[in-house]
Image (cartoon, rainbow, N blue to C red):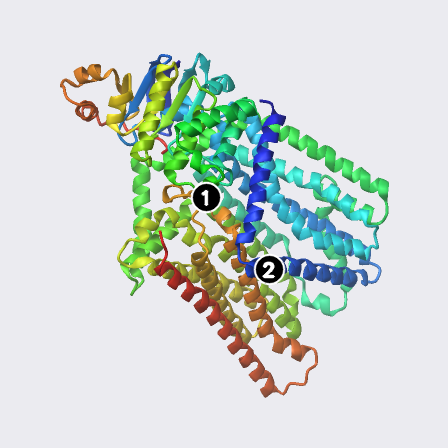
Amino acid sequence: MNTREFFRLLMQVHGAMARRRFASLRQESWLMVGVIALFVAGYWVTAYFLFRWGFRFLGHTYGLGPVLIDRMLYLFFAFLFVMLAFSNMIIGYSAFFKSQETQWMLTLPVPQADVFRWKLVETALLASWAFVFLSAPLMLAYGVSRHVAPWFYAKVLLLLLPFAIIPAALGSLLILLVTCYLDRRVFKWAVFGFGTVLIAAVSVVLKPVEADRLQSGQTLVLLGELLHNSRASLQPLLPSYWVASGVIAWGNGLAWQGSFFFLVLASNALMAMLVCVNTSTRLFYTGWSRNHSQDGFTAVPSARDAGFGDARVSLLDRLFDCLPRIHPATRALMVKDIRAFWRDTSQWSQFVIFFGLLGLYVLNLRNVAYVWSSEFWATFVSFLNLGASTMTLATLTTRFVFPQFSLEGKRLWVVGMVPYGLKRVVLEKFWLSSFGSVVITLSLTLISSWMLHVPAWLTLLFSATGVMISFGLCGIAVGVGALFPNFGSGSTANRRDDNPAKIVSGFGGTFCFVTSLAYLILAIGAEALPFYLQSTGMAFTPEQYSWAIVGSWIFVSGISLAAICVPMTLALRRVETLEM
Amino acid sequence: MIHTEHLTKRFGTLTAVNDLNLRIAPGEFFAFLGPNAAGKTTTIKLLTGLLKPTSGRALIGGHDIQADPIAARKLISYVPDLPFLYDKLEPMEFMQLVGQLYGMQRQEVLRTGEKLFDVFDLTETRGQLIETLSHGTRQRVVIASALLHDPKVIIIDEPMVGLDPRSARVVKDVLKARSQAGTTVFLSTHILHIAEELADRIGILNRGRLIAAGTMNELREASGGGGALEDAFLALTSEQPQEQAAAGPA
């Protein structure tokens, strides 16, 4: 069987399965499908108008408008390129080495290179679809601001295809090399080391803007510095430079120049694929065998490893023993969850990426440290900060907390049959995830408030809100996770959905994310309202202003309580009657 | 048909399969036994080419599984203990896919598939998605699909788990019949009476080493007693030195 026939067969099969999945939407609640569709449309419309407003704002910067807009596109695509490469690495690891389908394909009489090629396509599609989804409103807003012809959008789509291929080839090649030549434990520490060095480097490179300079009216100088500091995105050997240059050229009606960058991208994408596929012929099978040999090795630890493991176990156990008034069953479940999380490379590597981004964000706050001189800007940036932190937290809770109950799937016979019942399992997951989330949110809020010189009372307000939102988001994630569990299909013995990413991508995961975002918009919007009204000139007496803040905070407390209690109560009722 | 030469697999300091030398003839029904973590699944993964050996080699029908994997895999059907299936396909659609991946024509798959549907009592599953089938039925779909292209070698890991007595009987009868018709069957199991009932020869693996291989009578003699396979198995596996550990991925 040649490559074309192999691909044709698999495309037929996956096409049929996709049609069935789509058809099965009819069995879902129309209300929920409608809510999700509304959310998607809402994102596109909101993002479009925000980008449109942003382009108009930048366009009005005297003398620098087009330069700033162009630079924003260069930065956007540079950032996207890095994210796509990371995304391809993470998804590629699961697709190449952890998928049951890959194992099955490797026993078929088809070349291993064809199996790799198929998995490469699958990885690239999975990693890149969201990128098209997210960048569509940006491209639309850019096109409208440039008054382009309709076929500009078709040409941009054509440009994005080779752009998505390059990080797919690069990410896949990197993960093959890492799997072939780096031990898993070395890799784990290498990621931590790399992350630490990166954050340290960024903290050295990014210098805060001095308040004196801003106040002295040197705006043009500062803009010059901004352009100078972001010049790395103009490196002409970067694929992001080619795609941004192509978009800008076509946006300005420079057809030949745009086509030139398309051809540069296309030729490099083809070359990247050629290198990736040819190298993989040797590396893929070696990596597969090595990866599965490591599974065997770690499954039966040596005497030395066992000793190390014992020491670690006792440390974790000792730590939990110090916590008073925790039921032994809850404590055992918590220790199990922490241990399982730590040992699952694919879980914590994504966690590290989230934290890396948050770390960079917080470090970057130093660049707006000048805002402390203006109460309005300090408050405004603090709200943006609270929004960004809690939005990231919503992503974290959906990605890591929501699948927790489903992941118990095959173990439900253990945790479900103990004399304490599944209620305790659900509550344990709520408390453990809430505690972790509070630590994250509180640290971020305190650090960023300190960096922004936010007044103490506002820091306290933000911290209290952060804590409430952490509990609220965990309530939604745990509750919806138990209400819409994804145990996989078939009988108990066949429940094979052990991949948290796959569990999240289902209906329940989407519903959880949409609900979390709706809750956040409501909570942060309500809390920001008094500040917004005051800043827009509404005549508040100091007493009225204080009462408005207290009122908004009571409202946030109320909806947070609802976010915890409603899904958790429904979930606790549901697990009482859950058929395992 | 299956031939291993000094086949060895190490996971770090652990030797999962240690200098395994096997020679299984065409049409032979070979049962592969061993305690937990003896290295049975690792051996199967080496025979099917899912793992690279540390040293030695495995040949299927004269083809080295590492050097010439496609030629070797054309002869094999492998049924793992936890087989993969596309949940959103119907059983016949899955069989169509498997058949065509082995180079069969659509009509040929349909014809052979219908026969296997009858044999494995899968007729009632028509029109149902695999995700709705019970474990036992899924297992029957997998075994039927494995027989579709008339393989020369069937490598099967714990095939009876989850099967009801009638289905288990069907599977045993089909495997035995295939073996008598010239197909080599390599069956790994913990269920000793199945090995005793079906196998021409039995191999016992313990801590990565093949400690015994032969007919039922030869194993009885080797264990120094009479009685059932269970007695011989326990006698043989309890006499092994303890200094060497062996294990493999499940």
Q: Which label number is shown at residue A345?
A: 1
Relative image position of residue A312 (x, y in whole percent): 33, 48
Judging from the image, mark 2 belongs to the subunit labelled A
Picture residue at 50% right of the left edge, 70% below the top: A463
| Tag of residue A74 | none
The furthest residue to the left? B225
Q: Say what secondary structure mark 1 lies in.
A: helix
- Can you tell which quarter of the image residue A173 is in? top right
Question: Where does the image place residue A460, in percent across and percent down from the top left?
Answer: 51, 73
| A469 left or right, relative to A159 | left
Tell me the residue at 50%/51% (across/down). Answer: A504
Residue A34, which numbered label? 2
Would residue A136 appear left or right of A337 to someone viewing this image? Answer: right
Q: Is residue A261 left or right of residue A193?
A: right
- Relative vertical location of residue A57 with respect to residue B233 in this rendering, above or below: below
Q: Earlier in the sequence, mark 1 or mark 2?
A: 2
Cα distance between the residues tagged 1 and 2: 36 Å
Q: Quadrant of residue A578?
A: bottom left
Q: Numbered disc 1: what chain?
A: A
Location of residue B43 (image quadrant): top left
Is residue A81 placed above or below B121 in the rendered structure? below
Mark 2: secondary structure: helix
Q: Nearer the viewer, residue A441 or B124?
A: B124
Q: Residues within 10 Å of mark 1 (few under 14, many from 20)?
A: some
Picture coordinates of residue A437, whole percent (x, y): 46, 61
Left or right of residue A63, residue A231 in this image = left
**Residue A534 drawn at (x, y percent):** 66, 80
Towards the viewer: A167 or B225: B225
Residue drawn at (46%, 36%) of the image: B85
* Relative depth, front residue between B239 and A297: B239
Q: Residue at x 29, y 64 (%)?
A: A324
